[in-house]
Structures are given as structure tokens and as C-alpha cells.
Image (cartoon, rainbow, N blue to C red):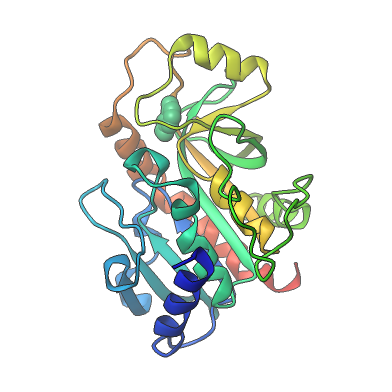
């Protein structure tokens, strides 16, 4: 079965069950799964109940789509994303993103945990992604192109929508939340980077590094979705700080910032009507 058939089958399974057409899709990164309160969930389905949907193997839960309303706006969220380091191809890793787009989501808000490369960043800072470097991981668009999704050679000159960036900055200001800005580089993981790699990323213009997001944004732009990305800086990248990196620290910092990030995402979603 080709990729488009897999997507169409899953679309048919979901379209019959979901309570509404989602306007916005949200991806909840490491430790950020609490952005949506359980009482607001109108419908959820685990990835494993769908066809050939990659399941997350980190953090103890295999992942699910959640349908909820935030301030009256119908959204679909991924609680638990899939990463290349779990052994999935880039095309498999973006399957859930494409499915959310096919279900009707026009906007996509990507959140992630990231290491800070820019020395002016501190742990707990939020960084609005202005652009990304994805040259170190395979493109999710390699292979047959599905014209129904998008063109063979999509333009990537404004992956992170200027309008949504302006909305994110205005929302942060209204909430009194500091929002840095910078370029995100996707590394494959699962190992953290070496100090030499971080020096290279810094020389290339990256401000933060993580193991997700760029491939998802690429697939979303290919299919015409409008993308916004926010990184939570959970640690100084390798060689920037003086401590070895560990996943527990990343999760701890993510937990601490979850409330701030959820208020920011909620405000962006609430005001998204005119992008
Ligand atoms: N590197 C890559 N991915 C990450 C990091 C990091 O330092 N922190 C959180 N995710």
C-alpha cells in the first residue's frame, strides 16, 4: 500500500468518529503532554488503533490524537510524537501530521524541548522558531510525490508563517511571557550532540537543537498548512553548559514550563481566526 492509501484509510476511520472538523493541529513535545486538560478532551484515539500509524516508544505512552476545544476553537492534538531515532523513516514520522492536515486542520503549532545553543538563552526560556535547518536529517518528502498533498518541489522560504509569528509574539506580550526567537536545527538523536557538533551548528546559525519538528514542519508546508513552532529550552546544548545532558533534566524543565507554554499556545489558538 502506498503512503496516500494509508492516509486515506486512516482518514476514513477517523472522519466517521471525530466530533468536529479540527481547525488547528497541535503537537505536544517531550513533557508537554499536559497542555490539554483531560476534562476538555471530547474524543481521543490511540495511534495503535489506526492503520500503520507509528507509535511513540518514549515516555511510557504510545501516543494518541486528542480532539478538544480551546476557547471554542476545535483542535486536534498529538499527545506523544514519533521521532526518527525510534527507527521510523521521515515519511512515517510525518504520517500523523499529514493525517491531521487531511482532517481539516489549516494551522499547525509544533512544540518541542530543545537544547540552547545561543549563549544568551537560559533554561526555561521559550523560543519562537523563525526558521530551521533540516539538512542533517532526511526529507520526509523523499520518494513518490503525491500531487494531492502538494507539489514535487515545494518552496521553503517561509516555513514558519510570519503572520503566526507576529500572533505568537503579540500573545506572549499580552501574557507577560518572555519569548526569544531563533533558528532550530534538527539532529537525528537519540544521542545528544558532541560539543564539536554544537560548535558547528552555532557557526551555521542555529540557536537551538532538538530531535524533531523540522521534518514535521516540512511535510505540513508541503500540504499547505500554516506552521508555528515554539521550543522550550530545557538545557544548555553540549559544551555550552558544564554538566552532562540527561533526559530526566529535559523532562524536569519541561514540566516546570508546561503551564507557561500551555497558556501561550491557548492564546495563539484563541486568536488564530484571522491568519
Ligand atoms: N539536544 C537535542 N535534543 C534535545 C536537547 C539537546 O540538547 N535538549 C532537549 N532535546
The C terminus sits in image quarter? bottom right
218 relative to 195, above or below: below
In the picture shown, does residue 201 fall above or below 178?
above
What residue is drawn where x is 44% and y is 68%? 1
| Residue 271 horizontal side relative to residue 195, left or right | right
Q: Specify whether residue 1 is in view.
A: yes
| Place of residue 189 in the rendered image (x, y in percent of width and height, measured from the top left) | 40, 31
Q: Quadrant of ligand 1?
A: top left
State the residue at coordinates (75%, 71%): 274
At 25% from the left edge and 47% from the top edge, which residue is drawn?
59
52 lies above or below 168: below
How far from the left and from the top, in percent, is residue 182? 66, 33
**259 lies left or right of 275:** left
Q: Nearer the viewer, residue 83 or 174?
A: 83
Q: Is residue 176 visible?
A: no
* 248 horizontally vs 192: left or right: left
x and y percentages locating residue 2 in the rendered image:
49, 65
Amino acid at each position: 500500500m502506498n503512503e496516500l492509501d494509508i492516509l486515506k484509510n486512516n482518514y476514513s476511520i477517523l472522519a466517521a468518529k471525530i466530533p468536529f472538523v479540527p481547525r488547528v493541529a497541535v503537537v505536544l513535545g517531550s513533557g508537554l503532554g499536559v497542555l490539554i486538560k483531560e476534562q476538555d478532551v471530547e474524543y481521543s484515539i490511540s495511534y495503535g488503533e489506526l492503520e500503520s500509524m507509528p507509535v511513540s516508544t518514549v515516555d511510557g505512552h504510545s501516543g494518541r490524537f486528542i480532539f478538544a476545544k480551546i476557547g471554542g476553537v476545535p483542535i486536534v492534538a498529538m499527545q506523544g510524537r514519533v521521532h526518527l531515532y525510534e527507527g521510523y523513516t521521515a515519511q512515517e514520522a510525518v504520517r500523523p501530521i499529514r493525517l491531521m492536515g487531511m482532517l481539516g486542520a489549516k494551522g499547525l503549532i509544533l512544540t518541542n524541548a530543545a537544547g540552547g545553543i545561543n549563549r544568551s538563552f537560559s533554561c526555561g526560556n521559550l523560543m519562537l522558531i523563525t526558521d530551521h535547518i533540516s539538512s542533517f536529517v532526511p526529507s520526509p518528502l523523499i520518494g513518490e510525490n503525491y500531487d494531492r498533498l502538494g507539489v514535487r518541489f515545494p518552496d521553503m522560504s517561509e516555513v514558519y508563517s510570519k503572520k503566526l509569528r507576529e500572533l505568537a509574539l503579540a500573545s506572549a506580550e499580552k501574557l507577560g511571557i518572555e519569548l526569544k526567537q531563533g533558528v532550530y536545527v534538527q539532529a537525528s538523536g537519540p544521542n545528544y550532540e558532541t560539543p564539536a557538533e554544537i560548535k558547528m551548528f552555532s557557526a551555521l546559525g542555529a540557536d537551538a537543537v532538538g530531535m524533531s519538528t523540522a521534518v514535521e514542519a516540512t511535510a505540513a508546508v508541503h500540504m499547505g498548512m500554516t506552521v508555528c513552532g515554539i521550543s522550550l529550552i530545557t538545557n544548555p546544548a553540549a559544551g555550552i553548559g558544564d554538566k552532562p545532558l540527561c533526559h530526566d533534566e529535559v523532562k524536569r524543565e519541561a514540566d516546570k514550563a508546561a503551564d507557561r507554554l500551555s497558556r501561550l499556545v491557548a492564546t495563539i489558538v484563541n486568536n488564530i481566526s484571522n491568519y
